[in-house]
Image (cartoon, grey):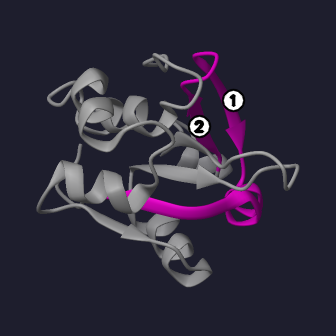
Amino acid sequence: VVGQMTETSCTSACGEMLTNGAIDQAHLLSVMGENANLLQLEQALGAGWTAVGNPQGVAQIANDALVFAASLKPTNPNLLNHTVIIQKSDTYAETGHYLVLDPWDKSGYLVDLAWVLKWTDSAIWSPLSP
């Protein structure tokens, strides 16, 4: 898990993880700035990346993608969204669990589809990503 460099560089850290380090967080942070959203990340990553911001699109990405970045809704309206990586777990076929990789504290935890759909505000993925 790539840890975020600043308090609000989670989207940049997730961009580095999505590209397996081909584009690093520092570069993305310099291009997008602090507290970037997934549309900015889509532009920074270039062709082949698709960001969606509606429940149907998020559900489709959760179904189709092996790995994607998700902007999570804040638990408090005074807080900012937080971007994490979500990938199908090694036991996805048996359990339906997703693994969340959080750049804030470099942690990982398992969730189900209901959690993904409840908390994900927008998502970005590429069919070309591993």
Q: Is residue 95 left or right of residue 35?
A: right
Is the residue under label 2 in contact with that under label 1 (CB below 8 Å)? yes
Residue 87 vs residue 124, the one in the foreground: 124
Q: Mark 2 points at which residue?
A: 99
Could you tell me which residue is drawn at 37 percent across and 67 percent down? 51
> Which element type, helix, strand or loop, lies under badge 1?
strand
Q: Position of residue 23 (x, y in %)?
A: 18, 31
Q: Position of residue 33 (x, y in %)?
A: 37, 38
Could you tell me which residue is drawn at 53 percent across and 71 percent down? 58
Q: Where is residue 70 in the image (x, y as percent from the top left)?
A: 53, 52
Q: How many labels does the image show?
A: 2
- Is 105 rendered above or below residue 40? above
- Is 11 rendered above or below residue 26? below
Task: Report if residue 54 lies within the magenta region.
Answer: no
Query: Badge 1: how crowded within 10 Å, few (<14), some, or many (20+)?
Result: few
Q: What stretch is highlighted in magenta?
A: 97-125
Q: Mark 1 points at which residue?
A: 109
* Residue 88 shows in the view: no
* Residue 22 shows in the view: yes
